[in-house]
Amino acid sequence: MPFCGHQWTPQTLASHVPRGSRGPAGPDLGGLGREPSAPTRGASLLTEQGATKWADVDTSAITHNTNLIKQLVGPKTAVMAVVKANGYGHGAVPAARAALKGGATWLGVSSVPEGIELRKAGIPEPILNLGYTPVAALSAAVAAKLSLTVYDREGLGLVKTAATDIGVHVKLDSGMHRLGAAPDEAVRLAMEVHADPDLRLEGFWTHFADADGDAAFTKEQLRIFLDARAALVRGGATNFLSHTANSPGLLRFPEARLDLVRAGLLIYGVRPERHWDDLPTLRPALTWQTIVTHVMTVPAGASVGYGRRFRAPAPARVATIALGYGDGLHRRASEGGEAIVRGMAVPLAGTISMDQAALDVTNVRDVAPGDVVTVIGQDGEATLTAYDLAEASGTISYEVLCAISARVARRYT
């Protein structure tokens, strides 16, 4: 399996297997009288190389999930895989390649540098910068053959100065009130792009503000967009892609799928809402793990961590883990967050630090340094998801995934 430019073999993996993981020689029962459940695909390799935290990314899951979306939307609707923010924390380049393999024909990014990263990796497929293009980035965007979003006069003037072939997607503000032109102005901008000999009107789009919540508002956004699109067509514009639907939009509003859908969270195997059951074979692509670095017994009444937020009601076993808010584990998860050790979900004990956190492992037998700890993923019969961590952190699964920092090594299978 590739990591850090090296190719690893079972012999390499066998040279250091953390306690409680399954090595080539067979299971280490760790004194529990049963096979430990730690799914440590990366543990032995990464700890040998000095890493104490890692995220395993199953690219075949991204391919599978993208294919599910393509099957759902049908042959007349293209799929754009949104790989901004380092592929929602999964790695932009591997995620892009996996999604293209699954049937995506477009890639979405939020900046010119993100698009250039994909081009430098040798990815030739169409890439749309969904966000702002600054003046200083225009020449690089043109050289990389990125398609650009335009939503105001300044942006239109900028792309015109290039005096060269640029694919333009005009963005209409239908109610998000973030980026986008008012409907009448969006039509005028699109008509000017259509009339310019150097520019191509490649797309006309909007973004839903609450497709996983307010159905009436979303339908009104769609109506506003479709009315503007009809005006654009009456003005003579043709051969452009109309797109509105993000992940929740493509699931909840089939009428919004149009020519292209922009699938972000879904391709990574996470539904916009925990209780939704669409695409039942969707597979989460990411497992986030670390290791135990120290275990101690603290007496009744003793506190653990900054601010002394955890106080042992009785003598307790506390395990320190090599993961903190500097790695993306939100400090807000200090109360209510969990992790899995030896197949059991256990609570965090005290305040999450920059580099470390603590777990109350009083009810888990024989926990020791080197044991693998799962923050997102499955270990035996215990599973923790991005939703679980998001709820404990007072945020959403999108932020949990995007927040996993560069200090956490990624491995790809």
Image (tube, rainbow, N blue to C red):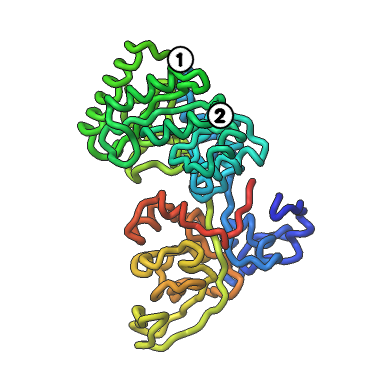
Q: Is residue 392 above or below residue 369?
A: above
User: How many discs appear?
Assistant: 2
Q: Residue farthest to the left?
A: 216
Q: Quadrant of residue 221?
A: top left
Front residue of 43/191: it is 191
Q: Is residue 80 visible?
A: no
Number of other residues with Cα within 10 Å of mark 2, as a class: few under 14, some 14 to 19, many 20 or more = some
Residue found 32% across the figure and 42% down from its top: 178
Number of other residues with Cα within 10 Å of mark 1, as a class: few under 14, some 14 to 19, many 20 or more = few
Q: Amino acid at mark 2?
A: Pro
Q: Residue farthest to the right?
A: 11
Task: Report the residue marked by disc 2.
Answer: 126
Q: Is residue 74 above or below residue 330?
A: above
Q: Which mark is residue 239?
A: 1
Residue 347, given in percent of the width and then of the height, sits at 40, 68
Residue found 40% across the figure and 58% down from its top: 389
Residue 279, given in percent of the width and then of the height, sits at 42, 33
Front residue of 111/213: it is 111
Residue 73, given in percent of the width and then of the height, sits at 43, 24
Residue found 48% across the figure and 60% down from its top: 375
Q: Quadrant of residue 102?
A: top right
Q: Secondary structure at mark 1?
A: loop
Q: Amino acid at mark 1?
A: Asn
Q: Is residue 20 above or below residue 362?
A: above
Front residue of 305/291: it is 305
Q: Secondary structure at mark 2?
A: loop
Confirm or deny contact between disc 1 and disc 2 (CB under 8 A): no
Distance between the alpha carbons at the discs numbered 1 and 2: 16 Å
Left or right of residue 182: residue 16:
right
Label whose residue precedes the other's in the sequence (1 or 2): 2
Left or right of residue 252: residue 59:
right
Residue 54, given in percent of the width and then of the height, sits at 58, 59
